[in-house]
Amino acid sequence: MNRRSSPNQERAVSIRIAAELTGVEIHTLRFWEQELPEFITPLRTPGGQRRYRPADLQNILILKRLLKDELFSIAGARRRLGLDDDRRAA
C-alpha cells in the first residue's frame, strides 16, 4: 500500500485472508455482511473489493461464535447483539 494509507487501511485484509484468519468461508462472509450490515462493514476499495479491518475480523469471530458455537439463528444473533431489526419491517 502507498505511504499515504491510514494505519487502519494498511492492516485491512482481503476477503480471502479474512476467511483464512477467521475460519469462515468467503460466501458466508458475504452473506453475513448482507444480513448484518450494521455489524460487519468492511471497507471497499475504489474497485469494490472488500477490505476487513481488525474490528471487522473481531465482529466476524463474535458472530461465528453466536451462530456456530451457541447455535443462534441470524435473527437471534441480531437480538443478542442489540441490532435494530427495523430494516426487516420495511
Image (cartoon, helix red, strand yellow):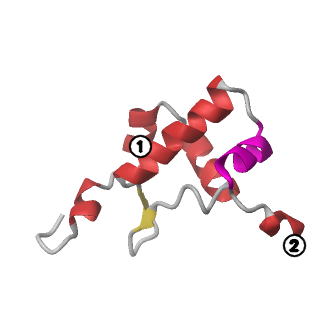
Task: From the top left corner, tell me how far across and down residue 45 is, in percent.
Answer: 38, 69
Based on the picture, tell me whether residue 81 belongs to the magenta stretch.
Answer: yes
Between 57 and 28, the residue placed more toward the observer is 57
User: Helix, strand or loop at disc 1?
Assistant: helix
The percent position of residue 46, horizontal first and vertical second, equals 39, 75
User: Quarter of the image containing the C terminus?
Assistant: bottom right
Residue at point 20% right, 70% down? 5
| Quadrant including the N terminus | bottom left
The residue identified by callout 1 is 18
Q: Which residues are magenta?
A: 73-82
Overall secondary structure of the magenta section = helix
Q: Which amino acid, mark 2?
A: Ala
Using the image as rendered, state which of residue 41 and residue 62 is in the foreground.
62
> Of all residues shown, which one is farthest toward the top?
69
- Residue 49 is drawn in which quadrant? bottom left
Residue shown at the point (51%, 43%) measured from the top left:
60
- Does residue 35 appear to the left or right of 22 in the view shown? right
Residues under numbered marks 2 and 1 in contact, where contact means CB atoms less than 8 Å apart? no
- Which residue is under mark 2? 90
Residue 13 is a magenta residue: no
Tell me the element at label 2.
loop
**Residue type pointed to by label 1:** Ala
Q: CA distance from mark 2 to mark 1?
A: 31 Å
Q: Residue at (38%, 35%) from the top-left corner? A: 21
Q: Is residue 43 above or below residue 63?
A: below
Of labels 2 and 1, earlier in sequence is 1
Residue 41 in the image: state x and y as whole percent: 51, 61
